[in-house]
Amino acid sequence: MTQGHNYVFPVEGERFDEAGKVSVQVKQILKKIGIPDAVLRRAAIAIYESEVNIISYAIHGTASLQVTDDHILIDIQDVGPGITDIEQAMEQGYSTANDHIRAMGFGAGMGLFNIKNCSDIFEMSSEEGKGTHLKITINR
Amino acid sequence: MTLREIAELLDAKILVGGDHLGIEVKTAFSADLMSDVLAFAKPGSIMITGLTNPQIVRIASIVDNSAILVVRGKIPPRETLALAEELDIPVLSTKYILFETSGRLYASGIVGCVRKIEGPESIVPL
């Protein structure tokens, strides 16, 4: 059993200029660890969309990365309005994005769908008025 | 096609990465929706877009685009170009519109990252 790598990155709401920063950093970290390109790409995409979600909808949040012998574990937690209807939010094309989000090339209702597609295991829970929690597992 | 040939074909300005014009490009993905680029673009492809914010560079870095080709004569702001320098991603700008740009490249042998999406159509609510 080797020691896992653990990282926590804060993400601030409404900082549209920073979208993707954590993702680019994570990609570099995973590359250094020696994760294959096809796998680290899925992790980077999942984190990118998660960052955009926090920036677009939440007050603030964190993206945590843990790399074990077998998995890449990504934990996204935010403090924000939460999601009322998770099933609806998961639908491709469903979005509550405003014009600002759309002008950046996001907010077309693809985010959660993209995240799920990049995950081997995807779990989401949300509490209205409190926030949303995503647990993403990607096999190495 | 090399980036140089693409730039010549589209009469494009090279804004970043003039020393990378020998890069060989075989595939492309055209979109103004960055989530779709994340979902469908393949490593080595050229991103063709009308967006100019710094996100296009971060996205290109994540999906390993070989270069970014900005259409409709748009010149990205300084912060976008500075990030492209930093992440070493060439940026070109052409006055051709997205349709013309894609068509000219396709006619010259560049193909899309995917031809069609797999699975069912997605219904987009109003």
Image (spheres, coloured by chain):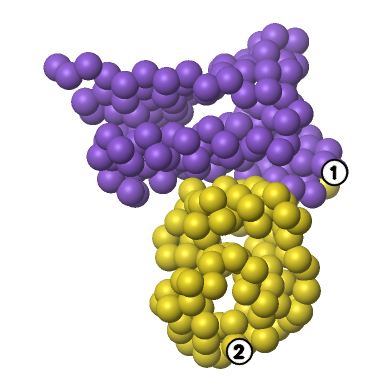
Viewport quadrant of the C terminus of chain A: top left
Between B8 and B1, the one nearer to me in the picture: B8
- Tell me the amino acid under the disc marked 2: Leu
SS of the residue under disc 1: helix
SS of the residue under disc 2: helix
Q: CA distance from mark 2 to mark 1?
A: 34 Å
Q: Which residue is located at x 78 percent, y 37 percent?
A: A97
**Chain to which the residue tagged by mark 1 belongs:** A
Chain identifier for the yellow-coloured part of the image: B
Q: Which residue is located at x 47 percent, y 65 percent?
A: B66
Where B13 falls versus B87 (above or below)? below
Q: Which residue is located at x 67 percent, y 13 percent?
A: A79
Residue linked to disc 1? A99
Name the image quarter holding residue A54: top right
Badge number at residue B9: 2
| Residue B40 in the image, given as x and y percentages of width and height | 51, 57
Chain identifier for the purple-coloured part of the image: A
Q: Which residue is located at x 34 percent, y 49 percent?
A: A38
| Residue A49 in the image, given as x and y percentages of width and height | 58, 38
Q: Taking the image as drawn, is residue A44 in sight?
A: yes
Q: Name the side, left or right, on which B69 lies relative to B64.
A: right
Viewport quadrant of the N terminus of chain A: top left
